[in-house]
Amino acid sequence: MRKAFRWLLALTVLIGTLSTAGAATAAPKLSASLEQGGPPSPEANGTTGRTGTIDGDILERLLAIPGMSLIQEKPYTGYRFFVLNYTQPIDHRHPSRGTFQQRITVLHKDTARPTVFYTGGYNVSTTPSRREPTQIVDGNQVSMEYRFFTPSRPDPADWSKLDIWQAASDQHRVFQALKPVYGKKWISTGGSKGGMTATYYERFYPRDMDGVVAYVAPNDVVNDEDSAYDRFFAGVGTKECRDKLDAVQREALVRREPLEEKYAAYAADNGYTFTTIGSLDKAYEAVVLDYVWGFWQYSLLKDCDAIPADAAHASDDDIWNSVDTISGFSAYTDQGLETYTPYYYQAGTQLGAPTIHFPYIEKKYIRYGYQPPRNFVPRAVPMRFQPSAMRDVDGWVRHHAHHMLFVYGQNDPWGAERFRLGSGARDAYVFTAPGLNHGANVAGLVADEKALATARILDWAGVASATVRADPSAARPLARFDAKLDHRDTERDMTLRP
């Protein structure tokens, strides 16, 4: 999938875990097994709420896992929250060729509760939080940092080992390590690139999880065919809003010279450089061309009121501020790109990146168009695109999806190319939340779909009551909403990406 905005098999099953080792050290032999815990079954209605375990301190059990070490424990009422390192092989096909430390977090409630396995596809947050499925099932949550996002990066970094199978194998080993501790049902989830990650994990290890909830997950099956995005932008929202956005974007290119002078001063004041993308001019156009996409990804139709109404007569500052607020002029600086190098690498090697057109902007104002992911990764890192990777996943989902739920936002550009289900799918669903953006979730679905989605998640997690199984409309999240743990706003960075 392109951009900071742009886009961004199973050969060896490793059993057990690696013993603790530093990054890029020789990997020891894999442990053949882990001690199996035996917590009792939860009550029939799935509402047990103990915060401890009946079979030993939970931290002791976690640290007894070979390769697991504690970084920090943070208090949160009703839970225990751990930030941990777990030793992973750099190459799951050749585990003896070195290891690295991968960060995970555990939001522990009770070993008798189901567990939600979350990844955002990027860095992991070290602040206690609860994803929507975790609230729905009132369970534990394990969150994993995606490989090659700092600090979960081998040193030195062999970028050829950053692919969707290696990342899925990371998840598989974390699951294998923790399943003896958390022995009840598991649900994997993630949003955007995390939703893609949860889908890829299911494709390569379909026997691990009991269900998958993938939010706003793009699916760029054919990288060079992106007309779905052009059709999306021709009809999203209202004509009035589209016209306002188009006019500001065009005006930012018409006024390129004075606004680039402002950009140069801004970069100098903040110490920003443009070595990776190649020039300030390229970075400026990339930010401006992100503007319309960025609005619909992160904003709602009502937010169109904040867009300058008469772009042609707006001040330079008004145009600059609108573009900066939505796209972020820091996005394509070296400093803005650095954190997301692993994403751009994957977009340019497997995930694909959308390209859209701008029929309302004269060609003379556009010098580069949507730039490929190659332009956002340092040239020292080799890249080669693999067109079969997404076709393989797409075909698998269409024909083999089981216990999978995909949720999209009606006004989210990334949903223009989405996962779809074929005749081979079983107990799988694709729902669209009306009027919502890249933050779409189950709570935003229409009533009957919201109830059905909630009921299926509860059932997959093994905590649906007899009433819910008989009548999905009775389904409700089992845990009360917590304003801190369950913060629902769209996660936004000044770099736009899935």
Image (spheres, helix red, strand yellow):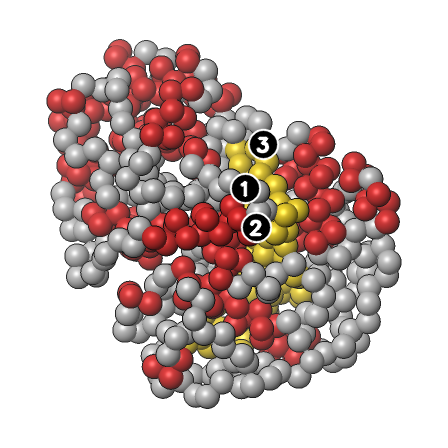
Disc 3 packing (10 Å; few <14; some 14–19; many ≥20): many
Left or right of 133 in this view: 329: left
Mark 3 = which residue? 433
Residue at 37 percent of width and 79 percent of height:
94
Left or right of 470 in this view: 179: left
Disc 1 packing (10 Å; few <14; some 14–19; many ≥20): many
Q: CA distance from mark 1 to mark 2?
A: 7 Å
x then y, percent, for residue 493: 40, 44
Asked whether disc 1 touches disc 2, contact meaning CB atoms under 8 Å apart, the reply is yes
Q: Nearer the viewer, mark 2 or mark 3?
A: 2
Mark 2 = which residue? 401
For residue 118, what is the image quadrant? bottom right
Residue at 46 percent of width and 88 percent of height:
29
Residue at 86 percent of width and 49 percent of height:
466
x then y, percent, for residue 462: 75, 57
What kind of residue is marked 3?
A: Ala
- 203 or 374: nearer the eye? 203
Q: CA distance from mark 3 to mark 1?
A: 17 Å
x then y, percent, for residue 390: 39, 50
- 38 or 223: nearer the eye? 223
x then y, percent, for residue 136: 70, 48
What kind of residue is marked 2?
A: Ala
Q: Is residue 314 above or below residue 25?
A: above
Q: Which mark is residue 421?
A: 1
- Which is nearer the N-term, disc 3 or disc 1? 1
- 107 or 179: nearer the eye? 179
- Which is nearer the N-term, disc 2 or disc 3? 2
For residue 329, what is the image quadrant? top left
Instruction: Kindly state the secondary structure of the residue where label 3 is placed.
Output: strand
